[in-house]
Amino acid sequence: MILAPTRELALQISKELNALKHHEKEYNVLTVYGGVSIDDQTWHLRRGVDIFVGTTGRIKDHMERKNFDFGSLKMAVLDEADIMLNLGFKEDVEQIMGTIKSHGPKDLQCLMFSATVPRWISSIATMFLKPGYA
């Protein structure tokens, strides 16, 4: 799962992931964001995807509807974490990451990317990254 602060970034990430494929069916990428039908996204999630990229609001929507199982996650990525803070998504990110931590596998790999490292980013890193990585 890759969490992005904006629809535009989520779409850009998905485009790049699809460009990395050696062949069309190598892996499935799903982009989830608001403003489009959640039913279509739900259908794809329930069929199974290898990578899903989404905005905080829509990922929370899918969490609340129980449309995916955190137990099968292998990696969670926060991209542009500093932008998420600036856009006011702090509580959403903490809720998503808290749910992943409590319902995800114990060996889940978490990655965070941020142009700057304000206190909130350090706090999130300390809470959710493995010891020694923050």
Image (cartoon, rainbow, N blue to C red):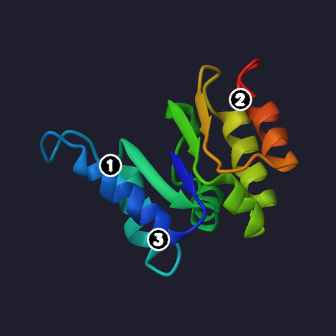
* On screen, residue 86 above or below 107: below
Q: Nearer the viewer, residue 21 or 29?
A: 21
Q: Which residue is pictured at 61% across the width and 65% down the height? A: 61
Residue 17 image position (x, y, % from top left)? 32, 49
**Dots 2 and 1: beta carbons under 8 Å?**
no
SS assignment at label 3: helix
Q: Which residue is pictured at 43% across the width and 77% down the height? A: 37
SS assignment at label 1: helix
* On screen, residue 10 above or below 25: below
- Find the distance from the CA under tag 2 to the CA under tag 3: 26 Å
Residue 31 left/right relative to 98:
left
Amino acid type of the residue tagged 1 in the rendering: Leu
User: Which residue, given by chain and number where applicable, does mark 2 sit on?
Assistant: 129
Q: Which residue is pictured at 79% across the width and 58% down the height? A: 90
SS assignment at label 2: loop
Q: Identify the mark nearer the N-term, 2 or 1.
A: 1
Residue 47 left/right relative to 63:
left
- Find the distance from the CA under tag 1 to the CA under tag 3: 14 Å
Q: Nearer the viewer, residue 134 or 40?
A: 134
Residue 99 image position (x, y, % from top left)? 71, 43
Q: Residues within 10 Å of mark 2 (few under 14, many from 20)?
A: some
| Residue 42 visible in the displayed image | no
Amino acid type of the residue tagged 3 in the rendering: Glu
Q: Which labelled disc corresponds to residue 33? A: none
Q: Nearer the viewer, residue 97 or 15?
A: 15
Residue 54 left/right relative to 112:
left
User: Which residue, given by chain and number where applicable, does mark 1 sit on?
Assistant: 17
Q: Identify the mark nearer the N-term, 2 or 3.
A: 3
In the rendered view of the protein, which quadrant contains the C terminus? Answer: top right
Q: Which residue is pictured at 60% across the width and 20% down the height? A: 107
Amino acid type of the residue tagged 2 in the rendering: Leu
